[in-house]
């Protein structure tokens, strides 16, 4: 909470008490308090970030100012009637309590700065796959509709002074309102997240501390989006990795392209399991589409390394050290890509949904280092019947469960509301402890399997 917001709460409380218990008339201290409060409000609007959670408080302060101005214009010097004092107290108290509750339920969290030695640069770019026609969305299978992706890059930097710190949600209010719609919430309820800043700086120069940095491709799950895993990307970038986060078009909550086209989640890509007899066919197509997106990103790395998408990168990517990381559908896609692409040297999965790939694929096993984290929620589920054989058939794979977690705990969903744990959306394990465990596993795994100088 900013100091201006604290002043707004403090003023409102003092105004209510002063107005209710004193016998001072409208032209004295009550006037002064009302005008001062309105000054705080205007300062907040002009110089701070306004939050919808404080709208009740804004209303009360504006109301008190209006009443004061009207009284001054009418030269009304009488004391405020006792009944009116009670009404002001009730309205003000309600505004304070309601705004306070909303700030607690929908707080504007800060993303903790990662503890790596590097600062972080970032930029986004787009890719078009010349070999794949889009299978989803309103232009599905049109001969001129090729598969397009939005990709964000995070990388280590030595110098960020003078560069703009970017927002956590790169697609801003359009994405937050798409999420609110998906959750059947009022359209504005998640608007506060648009003001959350990441720890990355736009187009900051890549570090010259090393000649080359290992590369990790990060893939979100069904209905997710790339910034839902910002914490992992920033953690890795601050520790000397270049991370590419994919927005899987039509599998992402929203993908906003440079030309203004917004590809919304295409729900028909993964229909309801219980009412769809060929559900696994749909699931297989979705996972393989994600895997195709990963391949496209891998295919683009040489051009990226040559500075085609940004002059911030100029040969610093070590294409001999490439890892994959994914959640849910993105984790299953990573397994598929790793099984079929020898450019991949290690893979980290979080509740990796490998069931759609089938048992025959699982028994082939991985020949590269692999670590899979499983939430307690997914323990004993259908996916275990496929993930366990994969781990057993692989040369160097481990499966670790984090108790007290749900499938959603592998994302930054707790940034949207403090209620996620209360309503069972996330698990019983403290969110900071859960994130710390995950971050430790991620960093240790890639440090051991990937970050070794050739």
Image (cartoon, helix red, strand yellow):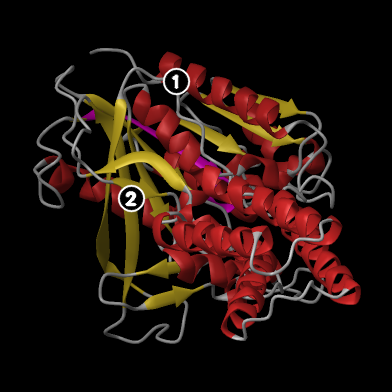
Q: Magenta stretch: dominant SS?
A: strand
State left or right for residue 235 relative to residue 57.
left
Question: Residue 102 in the image: x percent, y percent?
Answer: 73, 58
Give x and y (percent) for residue 443. 48, 21
Residue position for label 1: 115
Q: Quadrant of residue 249?
A: bottom left
Q: Specify start and end residues of the magenta stretch as a single range.
A: 318-330
In this view, the residue in front, 435 or 105, is 105
- Frontmost of labels 2 and 1 is 1
User: Sequence order check: which comes first, mark 2 or mark 1?
Assistant: 1
The picture quadrant where one finds residue 203 is top left
Residue 49 can be seen in this image = yes
Quadrant of the frame with the C terminus: top left
Q: Are marks 2 and 1 in contact (CB under 8 Å)?
A: no
| C-alpha distance separating marks 2 and 1 | 21 Å
Between 77 and 413, the residue placed more toward the observer is 77
The residue that mark 2 highlights is 152
Asked if 143 appears above or below 276 in the picture, the reply is: below
């Amino acid at each position: 909470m900013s100091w201006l917001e604290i002043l707004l709460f403090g003023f409102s409380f003092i105004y209510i008490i002063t107005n209710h218990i004193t016998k001072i008339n409208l032209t004295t201290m009550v006037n002064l308090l009302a005008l001062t409060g309105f000054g705080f409000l205007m300062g907040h609007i002009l110089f701070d970030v306004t939050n919808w959670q404080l709208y009740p408080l804004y209303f009360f302060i504006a109301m008190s100012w209006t009443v004061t101005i009207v009284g001054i214009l009418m030269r009304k010097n009488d004391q405020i009637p006792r009944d009116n004092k009670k009404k002001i107290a009730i309205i003000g108290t309600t505004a304070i309590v309601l705004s306070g509750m909303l700030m607690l339920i929908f707080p504007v969290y800060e993303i903790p700065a990662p503890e790596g030695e590097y600062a972080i640069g970032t930029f986004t770019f787009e890719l078009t796959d010349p070999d794949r026609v889009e299978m989803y969305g309103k232009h599905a299978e049109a001969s001129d509709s090729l598969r397009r992706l939005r990709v964000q890059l995070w990388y280590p930097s030595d110098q960020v002074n003078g560069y703009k710190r970017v927002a956590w949600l790169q697609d801003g209010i359009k994405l937050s309102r798409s999420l609110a719609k998906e959750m059947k919430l009022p359209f504005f309820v998640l608007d506060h997240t648009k003001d959350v800043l990441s720890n990355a700086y736009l187009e900051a120069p890549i570090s010259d501390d090393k000649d080359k940095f290992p590369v990790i491709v990060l893939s979100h799950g069904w209905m997710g989006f790339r910034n839902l895993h910002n914490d992992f990307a920033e953690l890795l970038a601050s520790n000397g990795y270049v991370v590419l986060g994919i927005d899987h078009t039509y599998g992402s909550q929203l993908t906003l392209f440079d030309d203004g086209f917004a590809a919304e989640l295409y729900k028909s890509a993964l229909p309801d399991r219980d009412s769809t007899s060929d559900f696994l066919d749909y699931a297989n197509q979705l996972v393989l589409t994600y895997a195709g997106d990963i391949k496209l990103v891998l295919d683009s790395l040489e051009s990226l390394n040559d500075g085609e998408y940004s002059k911030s990168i100029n040969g610093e990517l070590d294409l001999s050290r490439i890892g994959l990381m994914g959640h849910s559908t993105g984790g299953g896609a990573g397994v598929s890509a790793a099984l079929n692409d020898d450019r991949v040297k290690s893979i980290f999965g979080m509740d990796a949904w490998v069931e759609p790939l089938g048992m025959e694929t699982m028994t082939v096993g991985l020949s590269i280092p692999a670590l899979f984290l499983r939430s307690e929620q997914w323990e004993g589920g259908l996916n275990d019947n496929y993930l366990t054989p994969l781990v057993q058939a692989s040369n160097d794979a481990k499966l670790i469960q984090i108790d007290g977690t749900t499938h959603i705990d592998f994302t930054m969903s707790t940034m949207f509301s403090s209620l996620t744990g209360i309503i069972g959306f996330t698990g019983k394990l403290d969110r900071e402890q859960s994130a710390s465990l995950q971050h430790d596993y991620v960093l240790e795994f890639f440090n051991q399997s990937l970050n070794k100088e050739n």
